[in-house]
Amino acid sequence: MARALLCSHLPPSISSSLPLKSSLLLQWPSISKTSHSLLLINRRFSAAKISMSLRAGIVGLPNVGKSTLFNAVVENGKAQAANFPFCTIEPNVGIVAVPDPRLSVLSELSKSQRAVPASIEFVDIAGLVKGASQGEGLGNKFLSHIREVDSILQVVRCFEDNDIIHVNGKVDPKSDIDVINLELVFSDLDQVEKRIDKLKKGKAKDPQSKVKEEAEKSALEKIQQALMDGKPARSVSLTDFEKDAVRHLCLLTMKPVIYVANVAESDLAEPGKNSHVEDVMNLASELQSGLITISAQETKAWTIRSGMTAPQAAGVIHSDFERGFIRAETVAYDDFVAAGSFAAAREKGLLRSEGKDYVVQEGDIMLFRFNV
């Protein structure tokens, strides 16, 4: 899945302390507004200190404004931004809180000692060039950094400026996107083919392992065909079991993508007039939902993926919640706030019991019942 985000002209040579920063941040809610679903967790695990932030890698061709975007988004960001390729070699990392006004409301109702917002960890990754999958530029080192993140922010240059070097000599967002995507496809294809060969040579030791290996092989063969057609792994229809079987590979093209159109500040008011932006904006789709836990100790926001079932969402907090999931007592956010507490919502008959197949909805508040 992919989503398009419009930002102001962020040439690599311009510091994030300039007014351009505010132009970018005005557009930023188009990412953060997707983090909104809420859940209430069992008090038995209220003191957990597990960190669960979404890791988003900022990628793109060299010199398109990746580090300047990082500096604009991350408070006190100090990534080097310069008008030459590969000014970033080692990744820069920064953590940004995701605002959600409902967090404070739930914290007050539950009388939590503190409120902890969800966070996104941004990773500014070195520029990728054509042939990276074969070692060009920073090659495999760059690709390994992408493999470690949960989602990809691909910065695409959509502004004309003769003073800012373009690694390919011209501004062509569609071509830039194709270069990045094809390198990710080539890298995944190499990994998938090696894994298939290994599965063919190996023999599972027990029936359960054999079933899992067969599922992985089936999934990889479908993914292999898609990659050979130039399509990302995320475009392949897989069962939940198949997805779990290939998850350990951390395939690059399985990750959701946000395309960040880096435009001139003058284009922000009417981006539709920029022909470069039109191509990028057609790639938009949903990315993330959010999760909040409440207890007397703290109210904490988490990040979950859209379409997660109740057990999967519970597993974001702790694997025991998913492993021993029984049911989730659920109430809508507005009903919970109106009732004033979970107990009051139960007395008024506002709670409903949801099972393992229930898909978490926007604004759900849930009390997980589990046994391990």
Image (spheres, helix red, strand yellow):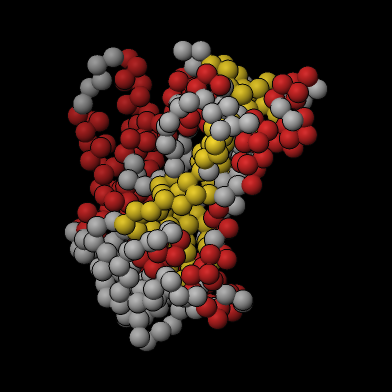
Quadrant of residue 268 within the rendered picture: bottom right
Task: Tell me the residue at 25%/68% (across/down).
Answer: 86
Residue furthest to the right: 348
Q: Is residue 82 above or below residue 180?
A: below
Residue furthest to the front: 113
- The answer to whether residue 31 of the structure is visible from this angle is yes
Disc tally is 0
Residue 69 % position (x, y) = 42, 65
Residue 367 % position (x, y) = 61, 24
Residue 309 % position (x, y) = 56, 30
Q: Is residue 276 left or right of residue 246?
A: right
Task: Tell me the residue at 49%/16% (across/down).
Answer: 324
- The answer to whether residue 256 of the structure is visible from this angle is no
Q: Is residue 10 left or right of residue 358?
A: left
Task: Tell me the residue at 55%/39% (across/down).
Answer: 115
Residue 299 % position (x, y) = 56, 34
Q: Is residue 176 left or right of residue 141?
A: right
Q: Is residue 161 above or below residue 18?
A: below
Residue furthest to the bottom: 162
